[in-house]
Amino acid sequence: MSEQRRFGESDYEPLKQDDVLKQAVSEWRDEMPSRDLWSGIQSRMGSTQSPASQTPTTSLTTSRRVSFTLPQLAMAASLLTAVASGATWMIAHPPAAESNEPVIQAYGNPEDETEGKIVQANFADAQFNAAVDDLETILREERDRLDPRTVLIIERNLKAIDDAINEARMALDNDPANPYLNSHLADARRRKLDLLRHATTLASAGGD
Amino acid sequence: MPVDDVVLATQGDTAAFERVYRAHMPRIFNLARRMAGPDAAEELTQDVFVRAWQKLALFRGESSFATWLHRLAVNVIIERFRTLGTQRERFLADSEAVLDVAPAVRTKHMDLSMDLQAAIEQLPPGARQVFVLHDVEGYKHEEIGDMLGVSPGTSKSQLHRARQTLRALLTQKVES
């Protein structure tokens, strides 16, 4: 066996120009399928959700996901917990006079004509759940690519947000039309999606 | 391809997604053909584009769409091998299939493209995937290790074995 071909020398580096394999790869022709594959794809697309129905509307041209550093995420989670506590306090101590502030829609298209109306949070919202499920699946599959300390921080923050969501849900059980709680729940959901998106981006980038 | 088609497809426009498919299908089909063989390539190509349709909402434009789709395709193809339960076992058993020879020299005219196609189909799946991902698609060993769930050292070892086997097979063809 040639010394040059012994593993550990250089045979896992890019192929040299004069290597027969390099020539073979460069001459490896592309082919086309023997049939049109689109009809099969189209029929299967019909049985799956379209991308637009899976997650809240995002646009590649008009909006960009907000990215946070991990310390920012930790701070956001702390802030969220504080807001949750504040919301709970407000339930227990309602303002003497009715607020004139506009009601904030809990979840859905912000361009819907719901001005002046209270829109209750939909706890079984399929879009939100589907988006969270997707992102959590990706995160589970790729969490090994993240530093364990990063995973710990992400999990702590997710738990804090989940706690805030659960608190808001329980409070809304008693007062479904409360605008503060609806707004708070919508905000918590948005934060959860942002955090999951950020975490999956980190994982996809190999934890860089 | 106009980025607008990706944006439109993300919003559920199937006609735009068909244009995306037409633009990217050749590269994805040939990736599947090289990694998994011609018999599985058509079905895998369909799987890749169905998955892409399902996951388009997660594409945020942080890399090019072609890069995103290519990585997704590699994952779908690797998943197929995992589903078949062959990946890890074949990685461990690959060494028996290696032919230990010096590099082939192109001594007479031959259709290298045809020969490589025939030779690569004789590789075990693990070695074949590493060879295609590294020497054809240009991924680094660290990336390949991440994708296949093996260490970079295993990826290097597989590449070494794949190259030796392919050189031996190509040499045999030339000599015969």
Image: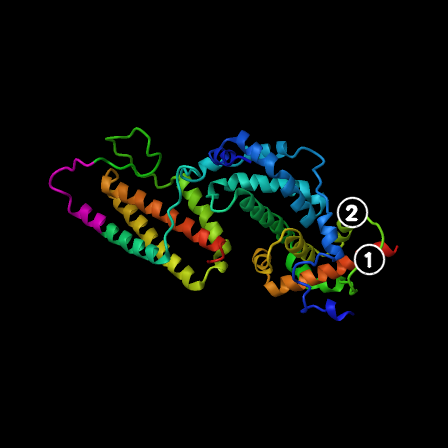
The N terminus of chain B, quarter of image:
top right
Q: Position of residue B162 (x, y in %)?
A: 71, 59
The three-letter amino acid code for the residue at tag 1 is Thr
Extreme-front residue of the structure: A17
- Disc 1 from disc 2: Cα separation: 14 Å
Q: Is residue B92 above or below residue B69?
A: below
- Left or right: residue B63 versus residue B153 is left
Q: Secondary structure at mark 1?
A: helix
Output the chain of dot 2.
B
Pick the residue in front: A19 or A202: A19
Residue A58 drawn above or below residue A74: above
Viewer can see residue A188: yes
Please tell me which residue lies in front, B18 or B96. Answer: B18
Subunit of label 1: B
Residue A73 sits in quarter: bottom left
Image coordinates for residue A69, horizontal then vertical, percent: 37, 55
Q: Quadrant of the C terminus of chain B?
A: bottom right
Q: How is the image coloured?
A: rainbow
* Magenta residues, start to end: A86-101
Image quarter of residue A126 = top left
Q: Which mark is residue B171?
A: 1
Q: Position of residue A136 (x, y in %)?
A: 45, 50
Does dot 2 land on a helix, a strand or a loop? helix
Which residue in the structure is indicated by mark 2? B114
Callout 2: 10 Å neighbours few (<14), some, many (20+)? few
